Image (cartoon, rainbow, N blue to C red):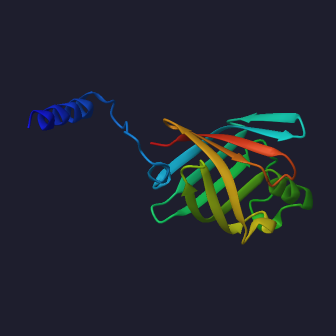
């Protein structure tokens, strides 16, 4: 009985003194499920040549719903504006610039907690070659920060690491 009271006291004290929103041993699937993230920065490494991108030039939004679906949109804020108010009337140069400076994908995901990887099945993407593919990305979560690494970025060879901050 004495042991039960001690454990109950410890549990109660932890519940009272932990900072609000702090989770004990939260699993990765729980961390992702129902979460929304805003892109903070990114690094692309192409054979030793690193490019660092930061907000507001680099903008992005990442969502994981409670039914294992994801949506990701990444774009650059410094791309040229279309001369027309219609996306259908863009110039060839404007359309190419927009395509080269943004990516969006959606589909389903699963988490491999021990390997710290997220597996995505891409159902739709602005990068057509990715549609219908399975991709694996390494992740690390530290509080409200998420790092995702991709060894097959849309720009070709190299690796990309993106840093996201949880939206509350």
Residue 83 vs 77, above or below: the answer is below
- Residue 83 makes an appearance in the image: no
For the point 26% across and 31% down, the residue is 14
For the point 25% across and 34% down, the residue is 15
Tell which of 57 and 20 is nearer to you.
20
- Residue 163 makes an appearance in the image: yes
The residue most toward the top is 17
Q: Quadrant of the N terminus?
A: top left
Q: Position of residue 3 (x, y in %)?
A: 15, 34
Q: Position of residue 82 (x, y in %)?
A: 80, 55
Q: Position of residue 139 (x, y in %)?
A: 62, 45
* Residue 77, quarter of picture: top right
Q: On the picture, is 127 further left or further right than 91? A: left
The residue most toward the left is 1
Q: Quadrant of the C terminus?
A: top left
Q: On the picture, is 46 further left or further right than 125? A: right
For the point 48% across and 54% down, the residue is 29
Residue 22 vs 90, above or below: the answer is above
Image mark count: 0
For the point 67% across and 44% down, the residue is 59
């Amino acid at each position: 009985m004495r042991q039960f009271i001690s454990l109950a006291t410890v549990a109660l004290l932890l519940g009272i003194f932990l900072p609000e929103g702090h989770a004990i041993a939260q699993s990765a699937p729980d961390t992702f499920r129902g979460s929304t993230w805003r892109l903070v920065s990114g690094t692309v490494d192409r054979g030793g040549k690193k490019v660092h991108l930061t907000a507001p030039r680099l903008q992005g939004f990442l969502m994981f719903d409670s039914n294992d679906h994801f949506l990701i949109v990444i774009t650059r804020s410094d791309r040229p504006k279309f001369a027309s108010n219609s996306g259908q009337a863009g110039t060839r140069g404007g359309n190419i610039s927009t395509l080269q400076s943004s990516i969006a994908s959606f589909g389903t995901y699963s988490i491999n907690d021990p390997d710290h990887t997220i597996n995505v099945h891409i159902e739709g993407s602005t990068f057509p070659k990715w549609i219908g593919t399975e991709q694996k990305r390494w992740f690390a979560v530290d509080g409200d920060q998420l790092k995702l690494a991709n060894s097959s970025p849309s720009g070709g060879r190299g690796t990309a690491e993106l840093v996201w901050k949880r939206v509350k």
